[in-house]
Image: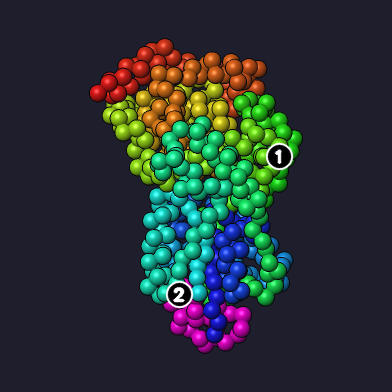
Amino acid sequence: MERVNIVWFRRDIRLKDNRALEAALAGGLRVLPLFIFDTVILDQLPSREDKRVSFIHKALTNLNSDISALTGIKDSLLCLHGRPAEAFELLLNSLGTDNSDNSANSVNSVNSIAGVYCGDDYEPYALERDKEVAALLQAKGIGLHKIKDHVILSPREVLKTDGNPYTIYTPYSKLWRATLAGDRENLLKSASLPALAGRILPAAENFNSIPGLADIGFNECESPDARWSPDFSIIDNYGKTRDYPAIENGTTGIGVHLRFGTVSVREVAAIALEHNDTWLGEIIWREFFQQIIFNFPHSATSSFKRQYDLIEWRNDETEIERWMAGETGYPLVDAGMRELNTTGHMHNRVRMVVASFLTKHLLVDWRIGEAYFASKLLDYDLASNVGNWQWAAGSGCDAAPYFRVFNPTEQARKFDPAGRYITRWVPELQSKPMVDHKFARDRALATYARALKG
Ligand SMILES: Cc1cc2nc3c(=O)[nH]c(=O)nc-3n(C[C@H](O)[C@H](O)[C@H](O)COP(=O)(O)OP(=O)(O)OC[C@H]3O[C@@H](n4cnc5c(N)ncnc54)[C@H](O)[C@@H]3O)c2cc1C
């Protein structure tokens, strides 16, 4: 009989610089690595072909083989499939009751979990899930230890002098930078990786290691490589290239890796500090929105500025479908939507244009656009997606003023002057725009003004 710790991987599917793993190993106990395919999340996905699920599967395979390379154990990553609280219940019951197999390396020889360690997560659903799991564990005397991992500074670490959270990016980013500068060594320090040999418990025979995608109800589909390595030619030129969607690799494509933790944000921030301050600013935007969703959870589902919930959205079904399909007649909007539908990615500049078009030109509730992006984006992250959609709709904190309505034709002229991005995605002859820009702009301004005048 042995007491062990569990490390529960969620947004940190990697071995290198993993703070939850470091904490789990610190006490000297052996560690059981765990991943749960969360059916609360998976059941909501609209398609059984989901690039994110394929990506996660690859990342888990990498993680398992990285552990294997250090321990010599073929399968050590234990994978469960279900609601996390139920998965833990099952696991605890099995660990606690079946002592028939006395092999020193089997989960069944363990009847005591000392603690469960995981990376902290600030989204409303994650907080609710963790609360439920913590209560369940607590009832058995086991602690759930949530360790800061996927951000440099947590939502309560960068606050105004009165203790309230920031709602404006610029002062937030100034204090973020000052806080990092004041404690750089500690904040960017890589988690240590002690020799893992003899420290990791193999997945037990009567539990699965990584299931096939089909076993959890998904088909394999194309997804990016689940390992990230920096391309300095992109990072060094980021400030010059990032606004032009026609430039292949004008941005880094790191979003999906930051989302699932196949790279450590500390490694990324250290590179940004050395190489490109503009790029560091983007990493800070990510943390800004993480703290917004944590400190203002209502903004996940309603307007950050409450008055914007009074806007009379048109939500015309046919128009929404044309936007989704990339058939609005505005070439830059259509190119962006087709890029998204085909690849699971859309260039940031174009995301801003399509989001503005949906909310302002078509007067569609930003939540409809947010949900569509959520169903498609490889790098989908609730905090960043909601934050940016509300920015585009004007309803968010520190948003563009509502009367600033992007002109999609002007945006194309400015950011895709040779039309190379557009022709890549919209090869056919251009059709008539579904709505006139000036008419749509005036309608948006009148509608917004009606809602906001009160
Ligand atoms: C309507 C809309 C929805 C968006 N939804 C998401 C989303 O679901 N997930 C997401 O990660 N980003 C989102 N973004 C922000 C941005 O478009 C993407 O982060 C970026 O396009 C990813 O490209 P990249 O991986 O090449 O990262 P790079 O351009 O190389 O940037 C590096 C990283 O910085 C962060 N970052 C960059 N821009 C932003 C930003 N505006 N807000 C927050 N973080 C940023 C991201 O983590 C990004 O991966 C959205 C933007 C808009 C306008």
Q: Quadrant of the N terminus?
A: bottom right
Location of residue 386 by image quarter: top left
Residue under the point 30% across and 30% down: 307
Kind of residue at badge 2: Leu
Residue 92: numbered disc = 2
Q: Which residue lies furthest to the left in this view?
A: 454
Residue under the point 61% across and 50% down: 187
Left or right: residue 420 compared with residue 179? right
Look at the picture and state if 191 lies above or below 423.
Answer: below
**Gap between marks 2 and 1 measured at Cα:** 46 Å
Kind of residue at badge 1: Glu
Query: Number of callouts in the render?
Result: 2
Look at the picture and state if 103 lies above or below 326.
Answer: below
Q: Nearer the viewer, residue 294 or 179?
A: 179
Is 103 colored magenta in this rendering?
yes
Residue under the point 38% across and 45% down: 297
Residue under the point 42% across and 70% down: 137
Look at the picture and state if 53 lies above or below 215.
Answer: above
CB atoms of marks 2 and 1 within 8 Å? no
Residue indicated by mark 1? 274
Q: What stretch is highlighted in magenta?
A: 89-113
Camera-nearest label, 2 or 1: 1
Location of residue 251 by image quarter: top right
